[in-house]
Image (cartoon, rainbow, N blue to C red):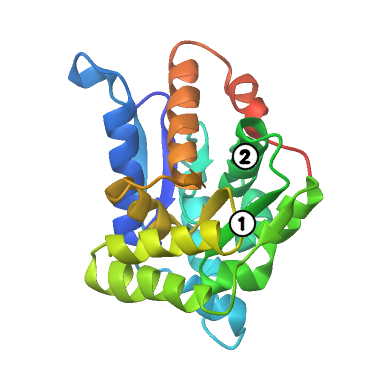
Amino acid sequence: MKHFFTILGGMGTIATESYVRLINHRVKINKDQDYLNYILVNDAEIPDRTAYIKDHTKENFFFALKDDVEKQSLLKPDFFVMPCNTAHYFYHDLAALTEVPFLNMMDIAIHTFLEKFPNEKKIGLIATEGSIYDRLYEKSIEKVGREVEFGGSEIQPMVTDLIYHNIKEKGVVNKELYHRILQKMHDEYGCNVILLGCTELSLAQEKAPDHPYNVIDPQSILADVTIELALKIRNGMEVDKAVSKYLYQD
């Protein structure tokens, strides 16, 4: 197979399925051969990311991802994508394992926010407890001169309920809960834009987009970038040149 990319997925599987569905349905096709070439590594046994980030006595999820990156690198994909925000806790360690370009979904999402909403000084952030705890999004957003709003103490339990008790445990999206979270972030905490810092939240956005609020959806953005890069490379652009636009400097 020529010119393929590797998806490091399974975190969780339903969210990965959403990402794959996006790239399959958004690419313009007239025949089977117009779809993208990719290898999906749906490693569903990767330990819980939030559990380890909050408590290092829990099983470290790095080693499972390390194994996936090293094995896939032998196949020489054009680039890696990892549609899991929380797993970006180890992004730099994983990227250092390979010479294959490794897209950073978090960086791409933040720069998209700057491009789409240049006058917004604040962005709401809803995510797993792990992503909030490790402060990666918070630090990256503050680094580009914007303020982060997490909402009040009632927000995180609602977000955790939506991510874990609905989507991860039951495989369903609670539309009303998702919309209520967005409404509270907008109405009560002044967030004109809300970043969905978990791919389960991206799934909620895919399934329940009928709301009036501005969201930055990293998984959706990554899907569009994936399509763009895969098609440029297929049409003859050098890999390094194609991906350079999205490999932001720290």
Residue 91 drawn at (x, y percent): 63, 55
Could you say whether the residue bearing mark 1 is in a helix, strand or loop? loop
Viewer-nearest residue: 169 or 88: 169
Quadrant of the drawing holding the C terminus: top right
Residue 233 drawn at (x, y percent): 49, 19
Which residue is at 66% across, 57% downward? 137
Which residue is at 49% across, 49% downward? 82
Quadrant of the drawing holding the N terminus: top left
The residue that label 2 is drawn on is 113
Which residue is at 37% across, 50% downward? 205
Residue 179 drawn at (x, y percent): 37, 58
Residue 161 vs 237, above or below: the answer is below
From the viewer's perspective, is 198 left or right of 40?
A: right
The residue that label 1 is drawn on is 190
Q: Amino acid at mark 2?
A: Phe
From the viewer's perspective, is 142 left or right of 133?
A: right
In the rendered image, the residue lying farthest to the left is 31
For disc 1, the neighbor class at 10 Å (few under 14, some 14 to 19, many from 20) is some
From the viewer's perspective, is 214 left or right of 243?
A: left
In the rendered image, the residue lying farthest to the bottom is 57
Q: Quadrant of residue 149?
A: bottom right
In the rendered image, the residue lying farthest to the front is 187
Could you say whether the residue bearing mark 2 is in a helix, strand or loop? helix
Q: Looking at the image, how many numbered discs can be counted on the residues?
A: 2
Residue 17 drawn at (x, y percent): 29, 50
